Image (spheres, coloured by chain):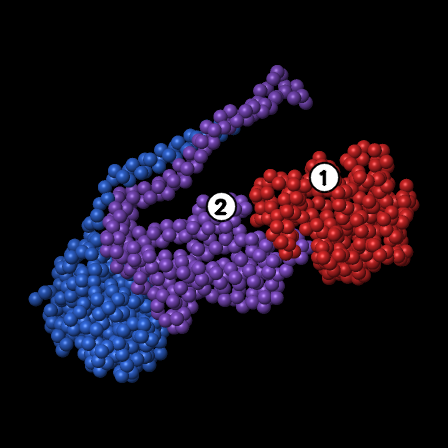
Amino acid sequence: MTALRPRGAALEGTDSTVLVRQPGPQELHPRRTRGRRRALELTLAIGIPVALVGLYQLATSQRWIDPRLYPTLDEMGRNTRDLWNSGQLWDAIYISCKRALIGFLFGAGGGAIVGYLMGASRLLRAALEPTLSMLYTVPKLALLPVFLTIFGFGERAIYVLIAVTVFFFVWISTMAAVMSVAVGYREAASTFGAGRWQMFRHVLLPGALPQVFVGLRIAASVSILVLVGVEFVIGSSGLGYLINQGRNLLLLGQAYVCIVIVAVIGYLFMALVRLIGRLLMPWAPEDNAIGPQ
Amino acid sequence: MKADRLRLTRLGGVVAAAIAVVIGLAACSSSGTGGGGGGPSASPAVIVPVAGCGAAAHTDPTDRSNNRTIARCSSGAPAPQKLLQPHTVVIAGASKGEYSAPVLLGMAKGEFAKENLTVKFVQMPSSDATVQLASGKVDAALAAPYVSFTNGVASGLDLKLTLANYSPQYGGDATKPQSGLWVRRADFADPQKPDLAQLKGKRICNTLGNGTVSVYWMQKAVQAAGISLKDVTWSALQPADCVTALQQGAVSAAYLLDPFWTQIKNQTDKYALAAVQPNEPNGAILYGPNLLEKHRDVGEAFARAYIRTINTYLGPGYHQNATVVNDLAQEIGVEPSAITNGYELKFEWEWRSGILDDIQKTYLELGTQKAAVIPEDKLVDRSFYNQAVGYNGK
Amino acid sequence: MLVSTEDRNTAGATSSQALDGRAPHAPVAAASSKVSIRGVHRRFAGKRGADVHAFGPVDLEIGNGEFLCLIGPSGCGKSTLLRAIAGLVAPSEGSIEIAVDAARQPIAMVFQDYGIYPWKTVEANVRFGLQLAGVSRQEIGRRVHKWLELLRIEDFAKAYPHTLSGGMRQRVAIARALAVEPQILLMDEPFAALDAQLREILQDELLALWQADRRTVVFVTHSLEEAIILGDRVAVMSSRPGQIVEVVDVPFERPRTGALRNRPEFGQLRGQLWQLLQSEIEPTRTSGQGE
């Protein structure tokens, strides 16, 4: 808080103004200022998405955009109700979630194990990294026909595809996390005579865990993305199928509603992973790097 | 600091007020349903006879028999009538195949150029084509009356079916191996005589799911056996994957397109052809508002060139015409032998009456169409081809 | 007054190495020499392919129960030498012999940073070394409790390190190292990251702790005062490649307290050490004083 009070005639080279440091509103009324700021932040955080939705509703009802191609909110509401009543919506949500979860668990489990092993062993790293890096860049969706042939056209192929995609994300971030465990931690354990397993259990595993969870959060949203893509191609059930069908049947309300539902599910999934991370790591500081609070 | 704080609070207030206004307006405004558009288009005022197109250029649209005659004019008819201004017509198609010949060959042979038209062929999935067509981003589509078309018209989109595409060479004849609904003999109680009623609860594979036109004749086939297509599960896969799925037993039946059915045509011990497209066109040219209303003359010119291409190059026996085959092969990017190895397509421009009722009834049964059956005059506009061949309704 | 004599407790001779590279006076290895460092060099591959000569040749005998401080300019290799004793790096030449009683924990080390584990509570950290050594659950409980008390952190047993200040964290590090009751305690500038007042407090505490059981300690530091107040002897290293310039006896009797800092002899010794060190830091300014 500054105020300039010029004092007297300005003489050359003299200090004719006085800088004043005084308490400002933050110091005088700390609670009120904090409260106001928080209220403002909350208003904006909620208000902006609500405003966008309201703007959309305005645009469709006022015909700024063609409501036949961009359904109004009540039409989308009607579509949702119809989908729910016919049982299609719940079935689709259930099966999509199930696929994403199973694929994620297998992929993340495998990726974490390989990541830890490769992070801890220089030899393994040198041996496997080039191969795995090459495989990483192959778009898995392009491999879908191969998977279908190998695993058949049932759920297994879908689980495998999601698991494989998630695997690469988790593997890379876990390996990087283990390698970045500060060498000082490892040295401390060495001086106490830690063997390989003890080093892993006491140092590498917990030390890498925060960054591993960042990778897991990304992988969670990736699994949803891949799932929807897969359900587009193998169209018989799931939210991706409903979205695609909405497109094909020109029931755009259905397509948009399901897209929103997919987004919500993705958000919840990431939040769940984050929550589990918080429970497992009471020592880690709050980090809002990616994902919800 | 104090000034900053005040400014921030004021900003916050303004933002909150703006949000409230927008929400209020949105809540108060009524959401109207789609309306407008989609009546029968204005017919041309005068129909003059066209040289080269006589009585044979028109047939009774209610005739859907297997041995009906197809409308024809002489080669080179109807003659071009060059537009005063050059125009570009953007037409969307799902792929480039033999069926696209009236458009692609017409482009290659300059038939559209003779009308002062430039045609641009853009590839996109059929579901997107309907939306693009309705919003005027493309002018026409080489597609079919999918359920997206009927749902779209029901919701007020300005679309019409104006020209037909082709009928299969052996339409309605399931004894001839061809594109159609193939089944796995092994999945039936009596593999020698598969009873379609046993498809109940089993899986059918096709590419476009249950919103595609072919469902109406597949439905007729299974209804004759006593079940409905509602009783089967649909698997939508790419055409090549449908063949694999059928071979692996992942599905019991598959609608196989050209040329994918040729992979199993010699294994009649394992697979049987259960149902085929009848002797009537399922595919068609759809016009959007640009060609229906805004530039009707362009729509007429396009129709003329399309019909002329059929009459000149794609009449019966066109597979023996090396020039046509080579040109077409080049346009669609395959070897000429790929064309001659298959059956000739019976190209025609007239749409049969009653098909759309059958199609829509099936859509309604399958639950893919939401509105009631739309009468044909709201879906089809025969005036373009009638005028092109000089048929005045008598 | 530089005193290079026989060490009080051992028969091992100190070695002094002149800067002009004369061969060292070979020490007589005494039976009670805890750590014998002989002719040790450490080199490693540098960035542009040339070898970096971190330190060497170094000869040093450290007696059983001795508190030896190691000082020297930055980059002289004293930390590396400590790590070589710890076994974290191996010497490129020469050998280090450490006489230990196999039944007891040989070595424990306290680092300047990254010592204790943020994912373990204070108690779990202190327990760590004992767990690795396979000590019985009961004994672990007893020792942890004892050392938490001695380092005055028992109230924070269930806390995580990120809630503690730097000084508290170093206490935890020291507790962890002492809990295993090592025969040799290595400390690598453990108080360097702390403020001056806290540093003195911890020095006094360490002094008290050590004087209670007199284990062998090798203590690396930059601070001359710290070296003098804590150590029995102070070894001064030259700049890179580090060699032992001089090993200076600290003549003050034990038990010592922090009050020692105020005595004039303390300041004199400090001045002498500073002269030695200064000539290492700015070799162009030596003018033949001392060795």
Q: In percent of the image, x 60 and y 54: which residue is there?
A: A203
Q: Which residue does the numbered mark 1 point to in the structure image?
A: C205
The answer for which chain carries disc 2 is A
Q: Which residue does the numbered mark 2 point to in the structure image?
A: A288
Residue A268, image x, y percentages: 40, 50
Q: Which type of secondary structure does the marked residue at label 2 adopt?
A: loop
Q: Nearer the viewer, residue A258 or B23?
A: A258
Label 2, residues with CA under 10 Å away: few <14, some 14-19, many ≥20: few
Q: Is residue B258 above or below residue C258?
A: below
Looking at the rendered structure, the kind of residue marked 1 is Glu
User: Which lettered chain is shown in blue?
Assistant: B
Q: Colour of chain A?
A: purple
- Residue B273 visible in the picture: no
Instruction: Let me know if marks 1 and 2 both belong to one chain.
Output: no
Residue C22, image x, y percentages: 90, 56
Q: Is residue B351 above or below residue B138?
A: below
Q: Disc 1 and disc 2: Cα gap in Å?
A: 41 Å
The answer for which chain carries disc 1 is C
Looking at the rendered structure, the kind of residue marked 2 is Asn
Q: Nearer the viewer, residue C4 or B231?
A: C4
Q: In percent of the image, x 34 and y 51: which residue is there?
A: A260
Q: In percent of the image, x 65 and y 39: which residue is there?
A: C152
